[in-house]
Amino acid sequence: MTTRKIILFSSIMLLFTSCNKLDVVGIIKGQSPTVEERFKQSMEYNAQNPIPDIIASRDDYSIFVCADLHAEKADRWIEPFGEQVVADETTEPFGLCLGDLVFCTGVQGVVWDAFQPLRDDGYNLFMAIGNHDLYFNEWKEFAKYWHTTAYSFRVVTPLAGTDLYITFDSAEGTLGVSQLEWLRNQLKEAYSQDYRHIILFTHTHFFKRDISQANTSNYNAEETVELLTMFAQYGVDYVLTGHDHYYEHTEYRGVDYYTLNAMSEYDEHASYYRMTLSDNLTLEEIRLDEHLTYT
């Protein structure tokens, strides 16, 4: 590499680092704790803070799901999103967020505050962790507000039975040894129970239709095969993911995999989903720009 190229490359890297666009140190050596360490912390938190069952108001209940907020300063979509969710009296008071809450460091508190009106209205927010939530040692902030990255909870319907939700940490494209064993045990136990549906939600997708994320935190081939085989073997019904910012639905070995569009601060057509569970799962995409236009 010539001296001119070295200077140009160094200048670009410095520029990106100065505005927190690229975690240069993290590229060489991860600054956040490893997935094994994060999983251990999560289990310690879970042991002291078990999630009580959620009692749904109806058998075919609806919740909200969003992914990839990528907040950098003050996410412009969270407030209208919260207003629309609260105004929809047909949904249950909880929802899922599939990771990448922030774009860079120092913003988890902004996201936490932006979601405060939803919490004030009694909504439970169940978070998955994304790769952006780890950059610049951002794990400290994520754990401060959201505490855990691997956990499960149950939703009990009036007559149709109980649904099991499980999330796990896929932010680095690997579950690690301990978390993989935990997930396997969770699914084995679930398979022996009479659940109506088993729903997994996490950040990193398993199938993708383009290369928008290149190789960022994707699973390796061996782990992908092991996980997909395990999901089919133990009766998982639905897997919800984000990361790629494009909607995609793939059915593989009896399991439905959904990758959701982003609710990104940088997306003019940001959207979230109204997910309804009955005998099956349906997703209604709700565009926030249209909501803002017509209110």
Image: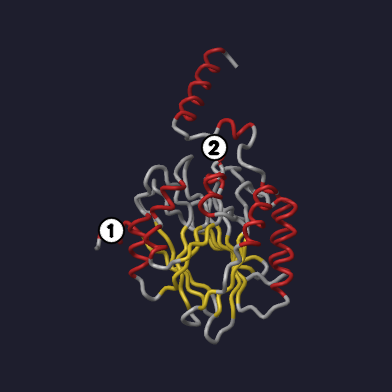
Residue mark closest to the camera, 2 vs 1 = 2
Residue 149 picture quarter: bottom right
Q: What residue type is labelled 2?
A: Phe
Q: Nearer the viewer, residue 115 or 21?
A: 115
Q: Relative to 101, say whether 290 is above or below.
A: below
Q: Relative to 185, say whether 67 is above or below.
A: above
For label 2, count other residues whose C-alpha is less than 10 Å away and answer few (under 14), some (14-19) or many (20+): many
> At numbered mark 1, what does the secondary structure look like: helix, strand or loop?
helix
Outermost residue, top side: 3
Q: How many labels does the image show?
A: 2
Could you tell me residue 93's position as x and y percent? 44, 70
Q: Nearer the viewer, residue 8 or 74?
A: 74
User: Which residue: 49% across, 29% down?
Assistant: 17
CA distance for labels 2 and 1: 33 Å
Could you tell me residue 283's position as x and y percent? 47, 68
User: Which residue: 61% across, 79% down?
Assistant: 196
> At numbered mark 2, what does the secondary structure look like: helix, strand or loop?
helix
Q: What residue type is labelled 1?
A: Leu
- Tag 2 residue: 136
- Tag 1 residue: 292
Instruction: State the quadrant of the N terminus.
Output: top right
Task: Report the side of 15 relative to 238 (left or right).
Answer: left
Whether pointer 2 and pointer 1 mark residues with C-beta atoms closer than 8 Å, the reply is: no
